[in-house]
Image: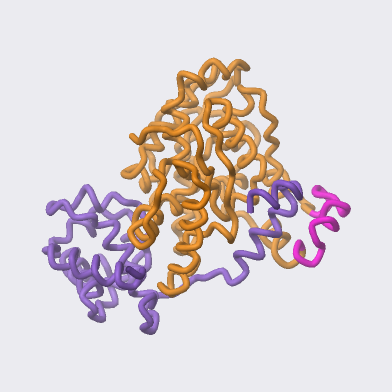
Amino acid sequence: MAVIQDRAVFWYGCNMTRHGELVRATAAMLEAVGIEAAPAGGPAHCCGSPKDASARIAEGMARRTVQAFNASGREAVVTWCPSCHMNMQDSMAPVTPTNFETLHVTEALWARRDRLAPLLVRPVTARVLLHAHHGFQGRVPVNDLVPGLLRLVPGLAVLDHPYRAPGHMCSALAGVPGALEDAQRATLDAAAATGADTLVTIFHSCHREAVTLERPGLPVRNWIHLLAESMGIPAEDEYKAWRNAADPRATIGEARIEAAGDVAFARLVEPELRKPPVL
Amino acid sequence: MTLAEHIRGESARLAALCTACGGCVRACPMTPYAAGVAEAGAEAVAAGMRDVLRDGPGTPAALAWIGACTRSGICTPACPEGLPAAFMLRLAQWRAKGALGEAPRIPVKEDAQLSARVKAFARLTLTEEEQARWL
C-alpha cells in the first residue's frame, strides 16, 4: 500500500457531482485524518473514458488532467472512482508521466484509521450489507477496506454474504441488457438472506442505481454517509430523496431549480430523476 | 508516447504471450450476456479476442464478449500465464470501439450530454464557490 502524503488532490471524478455531500464529507474526513485534500473533478478533470471510441480525444482529456495534477504540486492524488483510478494506472500515467502517487480513498482512510477511529464517536445502529462488485477488488481491496472502516463505527454491524455483482460499478452493468436487473435482484436476495436492515454502496454509480431499491426496513446509504454520521459531519442524501420522489421538481423546489437553470434541469437532470426503476 | 501507440504496443505485446486457453472466458461472469459465447467455446472466444489485439477482425462471439466486458477483473487471476487479462479486454474494447480510427465493431454508448449533465447536477449540489474551486 502506498505511503500516504499529507497534501493531496481528492479526484472525485465526473458523475459525483450528483452527490455534492459525498465530495464535501469525504474531503472533510481526509482533512480530519491529516490529509489536506483539494477536491477536483468534473469535465475539466476527466480520465478520458467517456471518449473511449477515440484514442486521440481521450488522450487529450487525460493529458490535461494529469498536467493539472502535476502542476498542483501535491504529492498524491486520492481517487474515488474506480474507473478513474484504473485509467490513471492503465492509460493516463503510461502516456503522460506523473509526479504524484495515486491511491484510492479507502486506502488513504484505512492507512490513517488510527486517527479516524477516535473521531467516530456517534453510534450508528444498523446491520448493514455491503453492495460489492468483483471488479476493482484486484487493484484495491475495497470489499475488505470499506467493511474494515465501517466496523470502526460504534453500533454498526457489517454482515457477510458471498454475493459479488459482476463488473466494477453498476453503471457498467446498466449498459448490458439484463445485467443490472439481475444484479439488483441478487443484491436484494442477499440482503434478505442476511437480515440486513441497511444496504450500503461503495461507489457513486452503484448508489445512483441502488437508491431505487430502498424500501421500508431497507434504507440505502453510501459508506461515507455512515462514517459522516458517526463523525457528526452533515451529509444529507439529497439525490436519493429526489430520485425516489413522486415529483422530484417539487421536492427540489422551483427556486433552486431556477437558480441552477430551468432549461438545463429539464433537459439533463429531470429525465434521470423520473426514470422508472430497474426493478 | 501517444495513447494510440500505447494501445498498439500493449496489444501486440500481450497478444504474443496469450495462448488462447480460454481460462479468462470461463472465469467471466458476463458470458451469459454475450451472445454466442457458450456455443463458440471458451478457447475460440479467447482466440477471437487475441485476434482483435493483433489487428484482426475478431469473431462475432469474441466481439460480443468484448462488448459485454464490465471490468469484473476476475479473468486476470484466472489466467494461467499470469497475464493481465482484464487489461487485455480493455485494450480489445478500445480497438473494437474504433479508438484507433477504424469503424466500430461493437456498440459505442457515448453520452453526448455527459459534461453538460455533470455541470447541471453540480449547480444543484455544490455552492458557487465549490463549483469555482472544485470543477
B75 left or right of A78?
A: left
Q: Which residues are magenta?
A: A249-265
Count how many numbered circles sit on residues in the image.
0
Q: Which chain is orange?
A: A
- From what the image shows, is residue B108 above or below residue A192? below
Find residue A119 and report its horizontal and vertical position in percent. Answer: 57, 18
Query: Residue placed at 25% from the left, 77% from the top?
Result: B59
In the rendered structure, does residue A188 fall within the stretch colored magenta?
no
Is A261 one of the magenta-colored residues?
yes
**Residue B63 sits in quarter:** bottom left
Dominant SS of magenta comes to helix
Residue at (49%, 70%) from the top-left corner? B109
Q: Position of residue A272 (x, y in %)?
A: 66, 59
Q: Is A30 located above or below residue A38 in the figure?
A: above
Chain identifier for the purple-coloured part of the image: B
In the depicted view, which residue is nearer to us: B98 or A195?
A: B98
